[in-house]
Image (spheres, grey):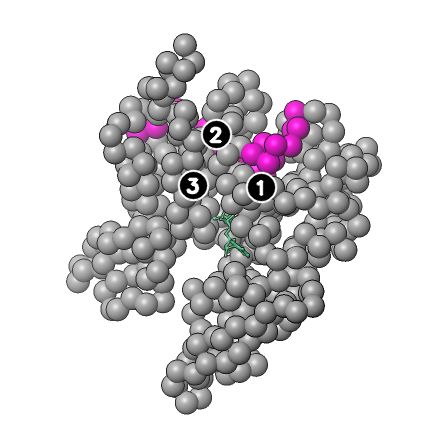
């Protein structure tokens, strides 16, 4: 019966991230994983028409002529532009589901810890206006912990650190509840900005956020090791205004990232200080699990290991932990009842 039902199942889980939006459809798994970016054409009356969504739109960031805008509708983990967020979701869902129609689906949306009631209502309403029958909200660190395979329902402490594009969330979970959580507006975007600032200061070179992210992906690191790479970076000279190329090393990028990384380390330490002793003891044994795209920064596990003295593990495929966990909750009504926020 459950196999039969899953054929017609409409249930979906959505991780609406600042950087990446992932969609999971029950019975099918992750059906979409794309940058949260929408390119629009703005006409003389200010009307916006969608030109591209996801990867194609991300390519356009910093490269658009007048009249075209590449918008990131999610900022700091919450919806900053409603209309565009809805258009983006509709696009991803329809494309994933072109042959079938979702008839009034049940929808789980993952939200950052500690978002306001107004923000929660906004998320519900946008899912409902996209024809959801029932909307459940799950806190992202809870979903990430489930997705990373942590035994969240046991009476034992689990610590999860989700380093996303806009935010980092640190949470301690026990008995399917969040015992302590802290969200800071530091993540991959701040790291990219730190790289932009570094190149301007040291080389008088202006680069865009896309290039900064490329540098981070290629040679970004949180912990040095001998023989790390360097790369050529192209940008515009601040003084002369002409294009110029400089060679940038992994060591200086690590130094440029020290400030945002320091804030993440402090947040993890702060959470450990606020954790009740029995749960701390569990975390000492089991370690801390890292999720989110930031967990892929080279050496971030080593940095946290040195700074906390705890075992640090990286979830496998950390970018998908949240949506995977929400998908698992869709498949398990008991679990969903426990972890959904009222
Ligand atoms: N290999 C990598 N090294 C460093 N950073 C990476 C790597 N891969 C992805 N990232 C960064 O991870 C961030 C995106 O992570 P993720 O998709 O988890 O964010 P998000 O869930 O959309 O954001 P949020 O949870 O804050 O709303 C981006 O800043 C991206 O540059
Ligand atoms: Mg996220």
How far from the left and from the top, in percent, is residue 172?
Answer: 68, 38
Q: Residue at x 53, y 32 (%)?
A: 325
Q: Nearer the viewer, residue 99 or 339?
A: 99
Of badges 3 and 1, nearer the viewer stands: 1
Q: Which mark is residue 31?
A: none
Q: Residue at x 38, y 36 (%)?
A: 31
How far from the left and from the top, in percent, is residue 104?
Answer: 31, 24
The secondary structure type at the circle numbered 3 is strand
* Residue bounds of the magenta highlight: 131-153
| Residue neighbourhood size for the residue with mark 3, other residues' Cα within 10 Å, grouped as few (<14), some (14–19), many (≥20) | many
User: Badge 3 is on which residue?
Assistant: 22
Of the numbered discs 3 and 1, the one sitting upstream in the chain is 3
Query: Going by the image, does 159 lie left or right of 60?
Result: right
Instruction: Classify the position of the N terminus by image quarter.
Output: top left
**Residue 220 lies in what quarter of the image?**
bottom right
Outermost residue on the bottom side: it is 240
Of the numbered discs 2 and 3, the one sitting upstream in the chain is 3
The secondary structure type at the circle numbered 2 is helix
Q: Residue at x 59, y 44 (%)?
A: 291
The reply to whether callout 2 and callout 3 are in contact (CB within 8 Å) is no
Query: Image height check: is 290 above or below 125?
Result: below
Magenta stretch encompasses residue 318: no
Give the Cα distance between marks 1 and 2: 16 Å
Give the Cα distance between marks 2 and 3: 11 Å
Q: Is mark 1 within 8 Å of ligand 1?
A: no
User: Badge 2 is on which residue?
Assistant: 327
The secondary structure type at the circle numbered 1 is loop
Magenta stretch encompasses residue 137: yes
């Amino acid at each position: 019966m459950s196999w039969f039902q899953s054929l017609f199942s409409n249930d979906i889980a959505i991780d609406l991230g600042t950087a990446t939006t992932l969609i999971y459809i029950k019975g099918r798994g992750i059906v979409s994983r794309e940058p949260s970016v929408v390119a629009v054409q703005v006409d003389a009356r200010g009307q916006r028409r969608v030109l591209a969504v996801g990867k194609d739109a991300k390519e356009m960031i910093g490269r658009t002529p007048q009249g075209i805008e590449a918008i990131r509708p999610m900022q700091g983990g919450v919806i900053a532009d409603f209309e565009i967020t809805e258009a983006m979701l509709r696009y991803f869902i329809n494309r994933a589901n072109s042959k079938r129609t979702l008839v009034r689906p049940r929808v789980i949306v993952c939200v950052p810890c500690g978002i306001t009631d107004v923000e929660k209502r906004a998320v519900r309403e946008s899912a409902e206006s996209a024809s959801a029958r029932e909307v459940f909200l799950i806190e992202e660190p809870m979903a990430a912990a489930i997705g990373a395979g942590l035994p969240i329902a046991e009476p034992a402490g689990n610590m999860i650190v989700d380093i996303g594009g806009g935010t980092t969330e640190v949470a301690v979970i026990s008995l399917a509840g969040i015992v302590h959580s802290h969200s800071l507006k530091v993540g991959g975007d701040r790291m990219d900005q730190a790289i932009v600032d570094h190149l301007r200061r040291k080389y008088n070179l202006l680069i865009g956020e896309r290039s900064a992210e490329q540098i981070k992906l290629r040679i970004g690191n949180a912990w040095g090791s001998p023989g790390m790479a360097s790369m050529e970076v192209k940008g515009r000279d601040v003084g002369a205004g002409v294009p110029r190329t400089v060679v940038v090393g992994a060591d200086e990028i690590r130094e440029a990232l020290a400030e945002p990384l320091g804030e993440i380390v402090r947040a993890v330490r702060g959470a450990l200080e606020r954790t009740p002793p029995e749960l701390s003891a569990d975390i000492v044994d089991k370690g801390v699990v890292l999720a989110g795209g930031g967990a892929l920064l080279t050496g971030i596990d080593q940095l946290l290991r040195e700074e906390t003295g705890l075992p640090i593990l990286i979830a496998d495929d950390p970018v998908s932990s949240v949506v995977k966990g929400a998908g698992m909750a869709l498949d398990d009504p008991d679990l969903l009842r426990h972890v959904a926020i009222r």
